[in-house]
Amino acid sequence: MVQELMDKIVALSKRRGFIFPSSEIYGGLGGFWDFGPLGLLIKNEIKKLWWRAMVEENDNIFGLDSAVVLNPLVWQASGHTGSGFADPLRECKECHHRFRGDDLKTNVCPDCGGELTEEKKFNILVKTFIGAVEDKSTLAYLRGETCQGIFINFLNVLNTMRPKLPFGIAQIGKVFRNEITPGNFIFRSREFEQMELEFFIHPQEEEKWFAYWLEKRFRWHLALGLNKEKLRFYEHPKAKLAHYSKKTVDIEYEFPFGWGELEGIANRTDFDLKNHSRYAKENLFYKDQKGQVIKPYVIEPSVGTERLLLTLLLDAYHEDAKRTYLSFSPAVAPYKIAVFPLLANKRTLVNLAKKIYKELKKDFSVAWDDRGNIGKRYYAQDEIGTPWCVTVDFQTLEDQTVTVRERDTTKQERIKISQLKNYFQKKIGRST
């Protein structure tokens, strides 16, 4: 049943234009995915909602968009070129398949039964070269996390925006990791997007702000419509903390393959600012109005856009005897409304439906569909998660009302055309 659900999500994602295997016509490339029209719409909704919650609703949080390729010294200072950003690697001596050591519960190859090599560390930064010659002097890396671009711009934001502690810097951007075993669809990929906040605080307030962001982020996921019963907190034991972390608590989701990280909230202390100060020979600190020097601690909530998209797909998936439907919250649904004429060959119905479609499209993400019979159109919109369908029928021509059908219940009601905008604004407003 576990694999069956994931297989259904993968098939639906391909069939309905959410997610495609990257480079598929050339046999694909492991750990890379392309996002189709509907997948892109949901990703954009996720990012807009995150940006609004983290930046636009907070006067003391500022946005940033740093480069993907940074000076290689950045990754030395952050500890990513050493063992701090390395996965345990074991290889089969027979079939030469590679595995993460921490995923194995045996010394035998799970694929062919061959003998495995001893565990060694494998750095997962993706290398590139800047310049005409490919040697050590031009070696660089695609960023393995977005936060380092924030830390190296700490002084720039401090000097230009003049914030007071506590304050934050937020960023959404692509990162690259040469994962040994990408898998579980888009749960673990080699190219993905992070949404990260670095919240700078007085060290004496670390517990207060850690608890604040943990609760705030949990409530945000609930507001997206995720099932509370499938969410939990998991605190990393000290022995397994990342090299930069004093404390990390994950918000986990119960995926078909087990509990896994959805979002991590970490207390990075002053690790990053301290190391960059040392490597760059710059004083990355905060001076208050009294002239007191403070070395801020950092609380970091970090969530992957693609992993959240997978979570939303899994959480929304439903089947009954007649149909498959995705019960997305209207806030994240790719289309909020679909509009269609009852009959595609009746010009009066089509023209009026087109007029309604164009009017609603000014304020909402709206789909147009005039293919096949009305039942098939309803089920097609259900399968992509459209919350409401508006049908123009012959009664519309008489009284200027339309049929509005709700996705989850399939209940229908008659609404005046003049009231549609207000009707949907109220409906969608209650979901965000």
Image (cartoon, rainbow, N blue to C red):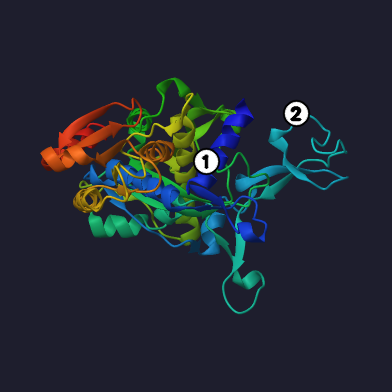
| Placement of 160 over or under 349, stated as above or below | below
Picture quadrant of residue 126: bottom right
* Count of marks placed on residues: 2
Image quarter in which the N terminus is found = top right
| Residue at which label 2 appears | 105
Residue in the foreground of this view, choosing between 384 and 218: 384
Q: Which residue is mark 1?
A: 12
At 20% from the left edge and 50% from the top edge, which residue is drawn? 352
In the foreground, 72 or 232: 232
Distance of label 1 from label 2 (alpha carbons): 33 Å
* Foreground: disc 1 or disc 2: 1
Circle 2 — which element? loop
Q: Residue at x 43, y 56 (%)?
A: 149
Q: Position of residue 116 (x, y in %)?
A: 84, 39
Q: Is residue 411 above or below residue 295?
A: above
Front residue of this view, candidates 54 and 203: 54
Q: Please, what is the three-letter code of the amino acid marked with disc 2?
A: Lys
Rendering coords of residue 3 (x, y %): 63, 31
